Amino acid sequence: MEYYFSDRKFNIMGVARTTGKGEWLVSADSEVKATDDRPAIALTMTIPFKTEQEQAIDEMAAENNFVLYQDEEGNGHQMVIASVTHDTLAHIHTVVCTDAGNDLMNEVVGAYTADKAYTIADYILMFTNDSGWEIGINEFPTDVRTLTWTDEDTSLSRIKSVAEDFDAVLSFGFVFVGTTAVKRVINIRHEETSDSLISFEMNKDINNIVKTVDIYDMETSVKAYGATPDGSNDPINLIGYSWTDPTGQFVLDQYGFLHDTIAVQKYSRLLSNDNPNPTQSDWNRVKTFESTTQATLLQAALADLKQYNHPNVNYEVDLANAPYVPLNQTVHVVDENQNLFLSAKVLSVERSRAGHYTKLTLGDYANEQPNLYSALKDMAVKIENIPKTVQYYPWVRYADDNQGTNMSAFPTGKKYMAVVYSNKSSVPSDNPADYAGKWALIQGADGADGVPGAKGADGRTSYFHTAWADDVSGQSGFTVSGGDGKKYIGTYSDFTLADSTNPADYNWALFKGEDGDVGPKGDQGLPGAKGADGRTAYAHFAYANSQDGKTDFSTTASNRKYIGFYSDFSSADSTNPSDYNWSLIRGADGADGKDGVPGKAGADGKTPYFHIAYADSSDGKTNFSLDTPGSRKYIGSYTDFTQADSTNPALYSWQLVQGPTGPTGATGPQGPQGPQGVPGSKDVPYTYIQLGTPASPKKGDLWWHGTTLNDATALQYYNGSTWVDQSIQQAVLSIKKLQSIEVDTSTINSPTINVPFSHVSIEGSNVKSTGTLSLNGASYVISGNVEDTNGKPNGQNYHTEVNPDGLLSYITQTDGTTQMRTSRISMGVLELTDLVSGLGNSAKYITSTFNAHDAVDYYHKDSGLETNDVKNLNISYSRKGPNVTIGIAFEMKTGNGWVKIANIRPGYSPFNNDDAARLLGSMSYTGAACELYVSAGGIYIIPWRGQGGYAGSLGFITRDAYPTNDAVVI
């Protein structure tokens, strides 16, 4: 599998392969699709890198870049890199990608009620308006619905909701020209629920089958409550609603309970040998649904009862190996030793091309009869014996017209192209008759007005406009009359027939790029699949510097301008250039880009950016420019944490780089003859200070490169045959002031380090600040002011300090002294302070603290308790911070009221001894209830009836010390 990495403009940054060929290897990958997350696809890749490749992998596989690939089913995918993990030590770069369609999560749509019935395409286009998405395949062209949404949502969630209402399945599709996505479509299809006829057998395809059964959620009757109508305090129920089940299995009684008359006979608590078919003592449940009418509430309760009127049975199937099976198709699970025959749906598919595995998640299990499994096996054998599908080969040819005149394998100068798929040979035919009816115009003269688009929802006609130019701005060589010789194409759509002559109205894209370099010669590729005649097809590549392949022809050296390709049934590469179809793959080098690579993140995790601008005055205001240095006299620079270059000259520090040209000076007089120098010794080393290479040096001589020692740039030593670089070795340098751009060192011993900064953006906002960062002994301090939009202090100051006691941080009001918000972390405690009112000495604050106890849940449960008044008493205590929840369940023994049934557990008492109370409903008798209240003295009840079971929970505030001996839930 090949994964193409591109930037946001579809410029290819590199190719990573799972085969190990090429510069980048995908050592692990995972593509996941699931029925409950369609149409989304998740892709994860791990790419190892060498030290010298670290910068390249950071650029290629950066966040927000695209990953393009085509899967085994021929579907093109455009993924967005959403997350990057770069491990410098392990030399591993991991990316997590989401489907480009997930971009619709960034759009929000409001509540909507349709004024009439619309098609699914109408709804999807409505909720993806102006997003660039179009409708692709639509298997629901005429179905209509009148739909309503009462809340706002993302565009992605809304179109998924539309699909659910139409029982449709959505998928994202991409149409590529080369490696550029030129069209993005949303496909609308019927759910594919066919049987794959694939069976997995125990001890062959299955490692293990684990069956689990539970009755936790079982019910044989349900009392349903719905939504609460406007103006009412009570939710709707089924009391008074009339309904009859045609099968007789389900019965709605006068109290609003829906009963299963068959399930109660199997699971009633009254079941015995003396009463084998009981009709009473149901497993009752009280449930709430969102239904707004009794009719819809009845259907919701009926569906719930059918789901939970039997034990919950589930299977976990550990597959040893699995083929690729599309989502929601049926597979079969067989364990003949257990006489277990199941069908299951494919709920998710994980596919790894690097790991050569496919993992399926199965669900919706159903029992099958053994004879059905036998029939499926027979059918699978018959399908296996069907002759293999004939292999087809693509033939591509170009011509001057739609009759195939002057047909050629090369597109140069041709206006028509034909593509034919043939099962005869992998070598394309050169007979125009074989391409009849397949010719398509690919390069025509500028025609008259284009065909108007389909009518929009408002009844206006949209028009698609095209222009061409020589640069990406559209300003150079702009024309709407044809693209011959142009490199860029611009497009836009509106409701005006005439083409705009303003290049700014168009979206520009490169469609005729400079020729790229030839890629390196790869290893021999894998043989193709067996053809119908049993022979193996081979693909061959060669390289040359001419279109006919005859100049500098080679099958191994890839540094050529043209690549040739053909396929046949011989593994040997042909040395005849005429056997190959040639294509231009390398052009001239492009111009240098402007932006450099950001530096590595500093200790604070932010990335610094270095900015440069040019001007013709020392204040930067005359002829200020970000990208035309050639004719400017001054250069300005600054550093901050914002990637974009500022257009404000005041932020830059300016230096003269081009002074005015002075007049030619007059020739000076001849100087006097100098005195005779002292004769040198041929054995004593000499030290040279000059720019040019010394003549006739001797061993031991030293050469400082410069005109004086003050401007010397290097030191070299002559070893008798050549000059050798030298360094100045010094254990200790005592320097009053060191001015340097970069210092490479391992240890800096200094009690004080001060770093001033100016006009630096505060992360996460457009607000800027000026201040200092200092390291003084054991204290690390950042302090500064907050600037207004003009770069002036607005009066607010901030201070952040790290010292052995912890962290202190605050920001002031505009008076510069009154602390507005303060946070402190000290010895395991977080303290937060906010200004409530006032300034200076009149300021009033509110302060809170937070520690480890506040962050966890304490839990305790007492089970099986019994008193004189209740039995089977179970009490659960839960506490987080000051909030306590008590859950309780018991069976009544007497009808005594105001009796204590348990002491309150320390750590869970109500604050200030206040009572907390609630009414518990009976699980056994309709309308019966019991008042439960809790105080510092204990837990008390006031029953209405002396029988039956009761359960419920209540919450309140406590100020007790934390129950540190109880269980902790993190």
Image (cartoon, rainbow, N blue to C red):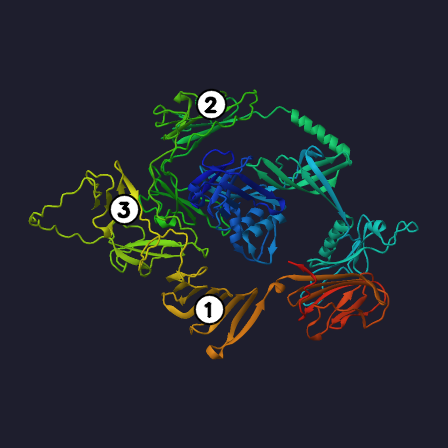
Near-viewer residue (72 or 51): 51
Near-viewer residue (180 or 700): 700
Name the spot of residue 959 as percent of width and height, x first: 66, 71
Name the spot of residue 546 as percent of width and height, x first: 34, 27
Binning the other alpha carbons within 10 Å of mark 1 as few (below 14), some (14 to 19) or many (20 upward) gives: many
Q: What residue is rendered at 75% in x and 33% in y?
A: 372
In this rendering, position of residue 429 left or right of residue 480: right
Binning the other alpha carbons within 10 Å of mark 2 as few (below 14), some (14 to 19) or many (20 upward) gives: some
Binning the other alpha carbons within 10 Å of mark 3 as few (below 14), some (14 to 19) or many (20 upward) gives: few
In this rendering, position of residue 36 left or right of residue 688: right
Residue tagged 2: 427
Q: In the rendered view of the protein, which quadrant contains the C terminus?
A: bottom right
Q: How far is mark 2 from mark 1, CA to CA?
A: 75 Å
Task: Say which label, 2 or 1, has the lower sequence index.
Answer: 2
How many marks on residues?
3
Q: Amino acid at mark 2?
A: Val
Residue 770, compared with residue 221, is above or below; it is below
Task: Say which label, 1 or 3, has the lower sequence index.
Answer: 3
Dot label at residue 811: 1
In what element is the residue under mark 1? Answer: strand
Dot label at residue 714: 3
Task: Say which label, 3 or 2, has the lower sequence index.
Answer: 2
Near-viewer residue (160 or 669): 669
Q: Amino acid at mark 3?
A: Ala
In what element is the residue under mark 2? Answer: loop
Q: Amino acid at mark 1?
A: Ile
Q: How far is mark 3 from mark 2, CA to CA?
A: 64 Å
Name the spot of residue 905 as percent of width and height, x first: 74, 67
Residue 545, compared with residue 352, is above or below; it is above
